[in-house]
Image: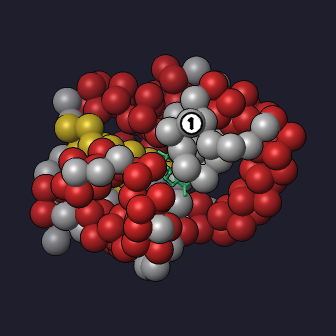
Amino acid sequence: MLIYLIGFMGSGKSTIGKELANKLSYDFVDLDKIIEDNEELSVRDIFHKRGENEFRRLEYKYLRHESLIENAVISTGGGTACFFNNMHYMNQSGITIFLDVDIPTLAKRLLKDKEKRPLIARFKKEQLLEYLEIKLKERIFHYKKSYSFIDASRSVKKSVSQIIKEINSFPQRDD
Ligand code: S3P
């Protein structure tokens, strides 16, 4: 089964994803990392040298990459769910889990390591809060198409055990 973790930057997709994969003995895959390894460029450089549209095209392409067909927990990028028919594709090919985190918690986490994230790298705290308000309003429409929602403001352990419950109640397809 493919387990897609959906959510904004800083929602804990990688941290929770690694722990979850470990618990399930699944592979952990970070979509940003797949793009970086295959393109031999960091996400930051792809944005700067080739632009956001090209990054979104690559995201679309590698989400459907042949390496993602086994049992895996996939940490998507914060925007992956919001472009093209990616959300529909993920709902067709696996289980989608939205990691819901309130804005103050996101801001606190993101202020610590925003440099590697091109969309927010130059923001001060106030600008970041404003950006989060606007972007989340835009993106929540897509995120809410996920099969289940997890309150990921709490501990990693609690999030992981709630996700495992959701997976256990997920109706498996036979094809
Ligand atoms: C993005 C989130 C990033 C990365 C890129 C764009 C976004 O991933 O894909 O910088 O549009 O929110 P993380 O959510 O893993 O930081």
Q: Nearer the viewer, residue 125 or 155?
A: 125
Q: Nearer the viewer, residue 170 or 157?
A: 157
Q: Is residue 56 left or right of residue 1?
A: right
Q: Nearer the viewer, residue 138 or 52?
A: 52
Looking at the picture, which amino acid does disc 1 mark? Glu
Residue 7 at least partly seen = no
Report which quarter residue 107 is drawn in: top right
Report which quarter residue 55 is drawn in: bottom left
**Residue at 65% across, 47% down:** 120
Residue 127 horizontal/vertical position (percent)? 82, 46
Outermost residue toward the front?
Answer: 49
Q: Count neighbours of disc 1 (C-alpha within 10 A) and say few if under 14, some if 14 to 19, many if 20 or more.
A: some
Residue 17 at least partly seen = yes
Residue 121 horizontal/vertical position (percent)? 62, 43
Q: Is residue 156 left or right of residue 140?
A: left
Q: As displayed, is residue 19 above or below residue 51?
A: above
Indicate the quadrant containing the C terminus: top left, top right, bottom left or bottom right.
Answer: bottom left
Residue 69 horizontal/vertical position (percent)? 15, 58
Q: As displayed, is residue 163 above or below residue 112?
A: below
**Residue at 63% across, 25% down:** 112
Outermost residue toward the bottom?
Answer: 84
Q: Name the residue that disc number 1 marks.
A: 115
Residue 19 horizontal/vertical position (percent)? 36, 25
